[in-house]
Image (spheres, helix red, strand yellow):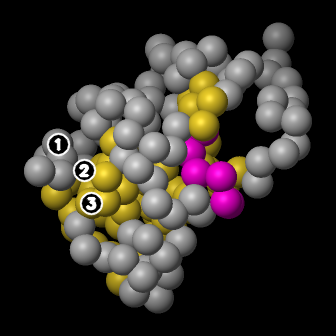
Amino acid sequence: SGNTLRDVNGGGLFTLDVELPDQQSSVVYAGTGGQGVWKSTDFGHSWVNASIGLTVPFVLCLAVDPSNPQIVYAGTAGGGVFVSNDGAGTWVPLGNITNKFVTSLVVDPRMPGTVYAGTEGGGVFRLTRP
């Protein structure tokens, strides 16, 4: 049988990006336009807000580190990049690219801890997680 798309959040969230850690995981992350990051641990059937420490609630893009699915990156509108080392339990800023709209994130699969951030009109930045 085919896949069926359905509304899983009541239509109340303006979702900008959705990210899955891997094909075996039941975890799904959603970045929203004004309500931070939301996380589901049951394939999207239920959601909880996962934005502790995320000081900018407009999340334009997300990325999960392929070498460690507990490490999640969030690109924001005007606040740069944030990283969570505990599966979106808490967030801290990464790098010094504030005041930029981060529209894309790519984790380097060959260099764990390195993420590339594409910005709106501001270039591409390489950031390294400590």
> Which label is found at residue 108?
2
Q: Quadrant of residue 42?
A: top right
Tell me the element at label 2: loop
Amino acid type, callout 1? Pro
Q: From the viewer's perspective, is 70 left or right of 18?
A: left
Per the picture, the main secondary structure of the magenta-coloured stretch is: loop
Q: Earlier in the sequence, mark 3 or mark 2?
A: 3
Asked if the residues shown at circle 2 and circle 1 are in contact, with their CB atoms under 8 angstroms apart, the answer is: yes
Q: From the viewer's perspective, is 24 left or right of 83?
A: right
> What residue sits right under mark 3 in the picture?
94
In the rendered image, residue 34 lying in the magenta stretch gets the answer yes
Question: Residue 110 placed where, x, y %?
Answer: 16, 44
Q: Quadrant of residue 2?
A: top right
Q: Name the residue at 25% across, 74% down.
A: 96
Amino acid type, callout 2? Asp
1 or 3: mark nearer the eye: 3
Viewer-closest of 108 and 73: 73
Specify start and end residues of the magenta stretch as a single range: 33-38
> What residue sits right under mark 1 in the picture?
112
